[in-house]
Image (cartoon, rainbow, N blue to C red):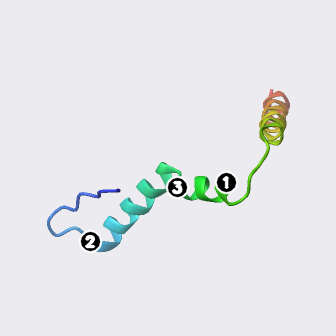
Amino acid sequence: MIIVPVKEGENIERALKKFKRKYEKTGIVKELRARQAFQKPSVTNRKKMMKAVYVQQLRNAEE
């Protein structure tokens, strides 16, 4: 359960923004989407590898 401490007289929009930030950091939505459909471990590993190659190419192009 996510608990957001709200100070006396604090704006409700600010408290809501804190809640949203904490909610995103927990990764609940990401996990829910991942669990909607099973993905084979080989596919997951392939995607990780492709992402790593892409990031590496970006870094090489930057230099």
Residue topped by disc 3 = 28
Q: CA distance from mark 3 to mark 1?
A: 10 Å
Q: CA distance from mark 2 to mark 3?
A: 26 Å
Label disc, if present, on residue 34 of the rendered structure:
1
Residue topped by disc 2 = 11
Q: Give left or right: position of 10 versus 13.
A: left
Q: Which kind of residue does numbered mark 2 sit on?
A: Asn
Q: Which kind of residue does numbered mark 1 sit on?
A: Ala
Residue 60 position, x and y percent, is 83, 27
Q: Quadrant of residue 57?
A: top right
Q: Secondary structure at mark 2?
A: loop
Numbered disc in front, either 2 or 3:
3
Q: Secondary structure at mark 3?
A: helix
Q: Quadrant of residue 6?
A: bottom left
- For mark 1, does the 10 Å Cα neighbourhood hold few (<14), some (14 to 19), or many (20 or more) residues? few
- For mark 3, does the 10 Å Cα neighbourhood hold few (<14), some (14 to 19), or many (20 or more) residues? few
Furthest toward the bottom, the residue is 12
Residue 1 position, x and y percent, is 35, 56
Q: Which kind of residue does numbered mark 3 sit on?
A: Ile
Residue 34 position, x and y percent, is 67, 54
User: Circles 2 and 3: CB distance less than 8 Å?
Assistant: no
Query: Quick check: 52 above or below 34?
Result: above
Q: Earlier in the sequence, mark 1 or mark 2?
A: 2
- For mark 2, does the 10 Å Cα neighbourhood hold few (<14), some (14 to 19), or many (20 or more) residues? few
Q: Give left or right: position of 24 versus 34.
A: left
Q: CA distance from mark 1 to mark 2?
A: 34 Å
